[in-house]
């Protein structure tokens, strides 16, 4: 009885195939390397995944509204660069972090303004802001790279609380907060409803512009947090440090079963998506595959996971349609 | 003696868990229009789809010209001379009429395989001429045409396959009454040419105008085939619904206490609405009768705040609400049941529970935190109150029938405690049973002191339900009458001609 209920809820959830993809990737990895399943390595994977999770968590909300935010990686870079510069001028670390988060918030609100108020297509608007923030980061750094950040700042990226790395704790807390926002608040509900049918949201008297602004602001905030953790982990900052993330941030969300059309999916899928992407590069490092091939493999896994997800969704729809 | 074109014997089709058709017999003669009627889910469309080869029947046999046949897919049926015109138009909006008619089978020059546009246009024109549509411009992309014209092009496309049988599946669902008349004229021509026509429809008043014979289905079962005119409307509805329906439009006498909505000299920016004025009292049902395109929907959108007016004034319960956005209008108790529920009324991917609380979210959860249990409780209350089927809060709204979807939209507004509601085409595309439920709901709402502004192109409905009627034509409100002051025919004339003679 209980098991069948679990089975049913698994089949009905969008996470089923994401979860199976995770098990599949883990299974293959275990076969390829003995050290993969060791506790140390699993912690390493989570620590590596944490920045990606943070960056893609706010983006999940944006994609749920039916929008997209392509400016996340360079917003993170801009915030990282400004934070590093401020830390070098001996400003209090708490103040610096708050300033960093505010910058992310401003970028997010700017995106929300472009999409919600000016009604620009999100893809183009946020691609534009991505270039703008990259330009700003370059101006801030004047082409230089900053190394050796203050000792009281780097633990955010490399420190431990007991046996657990601090970035993992930060990302876990953030994911809980975002899960609560999306699942348990009226804002979250409005985000889903807006993504499901924007016209119906307007005709239901919802404040569609405000909801859009809030979703993009959230994405800006988490981008900033991701940038701060990234900078602390690298113990360095440079204007191009967002490059390595690029569209991986979007891929993590989409692999997690969140529909690019909006209205379907959620934060836990994104967490699994981020972990899968990290495992792939982890296992290839463990068995010593060169980095050219890594990119190829990551690309293929993204395509296969999304294909599986779409395929399973169609199957479910058909089965339900034939019942009703 | 007319020859029998198509015969269906003992057709049965079931889907997992449901028997959609059981042992259905059906015959179609050359030169006849055979109407298929029944409530939603009665099996009309399933029967049409079995004939078209979309579904494969479980058992039963089909005979075409007395030869046993079975079709593997719609293309196969088409090759055997059976074409279909659907409710949803299947055209490419940016292509013109000839391109749409010959989509994927464009006539080509022999060797170069380049499309022969001249030949394509000539042939398209010949099919459009058959339909009496000489004035359709062949260069204009079809999206520039109104729905009725597009429907004609769709029929021309069906004709271009040289069919012996055409199936119209709810083809008039998006047409106004005038456009429907035009369509019927063309169907008559096709009948005279000896084609067999199967006509699937919801609209009662259409059966007599168009049908030679009528077959009634109920719950997937064949009930009866009758000659047109053999039974009265009431008897026909009783057979369709399977229970006695003595009166369709029931109104409880009511006292109106005080004005709740006043619209003064309202005009829009696009020139579709011109200085319209109307009033609505508490506990009153006021109808706006007008053709599609008369500015009714634009007027409703302005009152609700979706579009901003150019001039004029809207007063709700004594407060001037001119030009305020929908979210504020909703807060003040205004509700709108939009004309197209799938596009504007529902989050189709979301569950019943989510849709029902969508408008009243702030009222139910003032802290901003949602309690799943309370949400389900509220949803269940309205599912029960409005008799929404299936009564499953988790059910995705897309999977409900049209009537039940409409009830979900209504419950959104009831749950949000709206007191002044605009119902734009509340029963479009809904079966008879659900229609009556919605009528009695409207009556109940009025009795409880709510006010309803009802827009409809279904004349008998707007005349039957309204305490007062405004008549709208070409963007103007040309007149208004009290209940019973004018007959249905008179209102209809005013609606179309703007005058009585």
Image: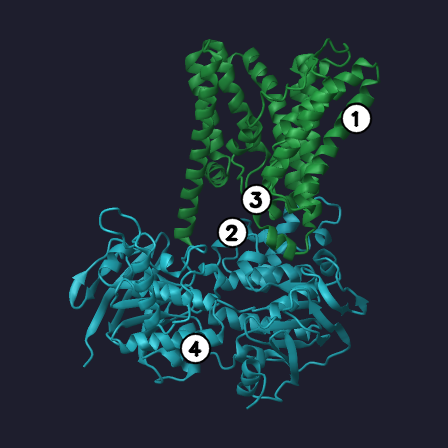
Chain colours: A green, B cyan
Q: Which residue is mark 1?
A: A98
Secondary structure beneath label 2: loop
Q: Quadrant of residue B331?
A: bottom right
B438 w.r.t. B249: above or below: above
Tell me if residue A166 can be seen.
no
- Camera-near label (2 vs 1) is 1
Disc number placed over residue B118 in the picture, else none: none
- Which chain letter matches label 2? B
Q: Residues within 10 Å of mark 1 (few under 14, many from 20)?
A: some
Q: Which residue is mark 2?
A: B395
Q: Which residue is mark 3?
A: A263
- Which percent across, then down, holds residue A245? 58, 23
Give A181 or B151, whichever is nearer the viewer: B151
Q: Quadrant of residue A178?
A: top right
Give A113 or B376, whichever is nearer the viewer: A113
Whether residue B216 sits left or right of residue B145 in the image: it is left
- Which percent across, then down, holds residue B161? 27, 62
B16 w.r.t. B461: above or below: above
Q: Residues within 10 Å of mark 2 (few under 14, many from 20)?
A: some
Q: Which residue is mark 4?
A: B181
Secondary structure beneath label 3: loop
């Amino acid at each position: 009885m209980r098991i069948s209920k679990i089975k049913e809820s698994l089949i009905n959830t969008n996470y089923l195939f994401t979860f199976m993809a995770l098990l599949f990737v883990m299974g293959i990895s275990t076969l390829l390397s003995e050290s993969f399943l060791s506790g140390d390595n699993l912690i390493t994977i989570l620590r590596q995944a944490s920045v990606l999770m943070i960056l893609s968590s706010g983006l999940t909300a944006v994609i749920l509204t039916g929008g997209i935010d392509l400016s996340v990686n360079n917003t993170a870079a801009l915030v990282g660069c400004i934070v590093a510069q401020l830390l070098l001028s001996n400003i209090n670390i708490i103040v610096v972090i708050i300033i960093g988060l505010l910058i992310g918030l401003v970028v997010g609100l700017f995106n929300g303004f472009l999409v919600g108020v000016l009604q620009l297509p999100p893809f183009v608007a946020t691609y534009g802001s991505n270039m703008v923030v990259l330009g700003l980061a370059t101006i801030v750094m004047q082409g230089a790279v900053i190394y050796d950040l203050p000792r009281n700042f780097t633990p955010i990226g490399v420190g431990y609380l007991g046996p657990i790395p601090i970035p993992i704790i930060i990302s876990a807390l953030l994911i809980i907060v975002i899960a609560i926002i999306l699942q348990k608040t009226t804002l979250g509900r409005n985000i889903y409803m807006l993504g499901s049918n924007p016209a119906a949201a307007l005709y239901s008297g919802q404040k569609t512009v405000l909801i859009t602004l809030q979703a993009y602001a959230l994405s800006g905030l988490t981008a900033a947090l991701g940038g701060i953790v990234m900078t602390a982990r690298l113990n360095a900052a440079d204007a191009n440090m967002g490059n390595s993330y690029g569209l991986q941030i979007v891929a993590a969300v989409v692999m997690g079963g969140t529909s690019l059309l909006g209205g379907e999916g959620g934060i836990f899928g994104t967490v699994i998506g981020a972990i899968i992407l990290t495992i792939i590069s982890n296992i290839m490092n463990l068995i010593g595959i060169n980095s050219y091939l890594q990119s190829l493999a990551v690309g293929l896994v993204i395509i296969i996971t999304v294909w599986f997800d779409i395929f399973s969704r169609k199957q479910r729809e058909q089965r339900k349609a034939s019942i009703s | 003696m007319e020859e029998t074109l198509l015969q269906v014997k003992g057709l049965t089709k079931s889907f997992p868990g449901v028997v959609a058709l059981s042992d259905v017999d059906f015959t179609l003669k050359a030169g006849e229009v055979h109407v298929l009627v029944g409530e939603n889910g009665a099996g009309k469309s399933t029967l049409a789809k079995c004939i078209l080869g979309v579904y494969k029947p479980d058992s039963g046999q089909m005979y075409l010209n007395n030869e046993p046949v079975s079709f593997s897919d719609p293309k196969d049926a088409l090759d055997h001379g059976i074409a279909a015109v659907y409710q949803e138009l299947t055209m490419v909006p940016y292509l013109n009429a000839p391109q749409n008619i010959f989509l994927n089978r464009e006539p080509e020059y022999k060797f170069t395989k380049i499309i022969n546009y001249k030949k394509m246009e000539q042939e398209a024109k010949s099919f459009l001429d058959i339909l009496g549509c000489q004035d359709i411009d062949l260069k204009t992309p079809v999206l520039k045409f109104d729905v009725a014209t597009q429907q004609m092009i769709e029929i021309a496309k069906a004709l271009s396959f040289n069919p012996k049988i055409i199936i119209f599946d709810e083809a008039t669902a998006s047409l106004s009454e005038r456009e429907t008349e035009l369509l019927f004229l063309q169907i008559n021509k096709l009948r005279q040419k000896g084609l067999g026509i199967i006509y699937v429809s919801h609209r009662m008043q259409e059966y007599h105008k168009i049908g030679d014979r009528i077959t009634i289905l109920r719950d997937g079962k064949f009930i009866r085939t009758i000659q047109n005119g053999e039974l009265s409307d009431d008897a026909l509805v009783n057979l369709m619904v399977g229970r006695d329906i003595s009166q369709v439009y029931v109104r409880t006498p009511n006292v109106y206490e005080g004005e709740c909505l006043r619209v003064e000299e309202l005009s829009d920016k696009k020139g579709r609405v011109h200085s319209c004025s109307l009033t609505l009292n508490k506990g009153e049902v006021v109808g706006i009768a007008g053709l599609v395109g008369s500015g009714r929907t634009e007027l409703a959108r302005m009152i609700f705040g979706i579009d901003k007016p150019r001039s004029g004034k809207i007063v709700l319960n004594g407060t001037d609400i001119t030009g305020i956005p929908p979210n504020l209008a909703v807060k003040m108790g205004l509700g709108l049941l939009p004309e197209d529920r799938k596009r504007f009324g529902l989050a189709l991917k979301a569950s019943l529970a989510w849709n029902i609380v969508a408008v009243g979210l702030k009222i139910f959860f003032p802290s901003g935190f949602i309690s799943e249990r309370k949400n389900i409780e509220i949803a269940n209350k309205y599912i029960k109150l409005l008799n929404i089927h299936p009564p499953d809060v988790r059910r995705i709204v897309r999977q409900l029938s049209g009537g039940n979807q409409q009830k979900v939209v209504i419950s959104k507004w009831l749950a949000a405690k709206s007191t002044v509601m605009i119902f734009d085409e509340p029963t479009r595309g809904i079966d008879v049973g659900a229609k009556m439920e919605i009528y009695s709901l409207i009556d109940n709402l009025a009795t409880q002191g709510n006010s309803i502004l009802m827009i409809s192109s279904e004349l008998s409905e707007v005349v039957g339900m309204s305490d007062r009627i405004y008549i709208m034509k070409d963007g103007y409100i040309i007149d208004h009458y009290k209940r019973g002051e004018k007959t249905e025919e008179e209102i209809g004339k005013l609606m179309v001609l703007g005058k009585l003679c």
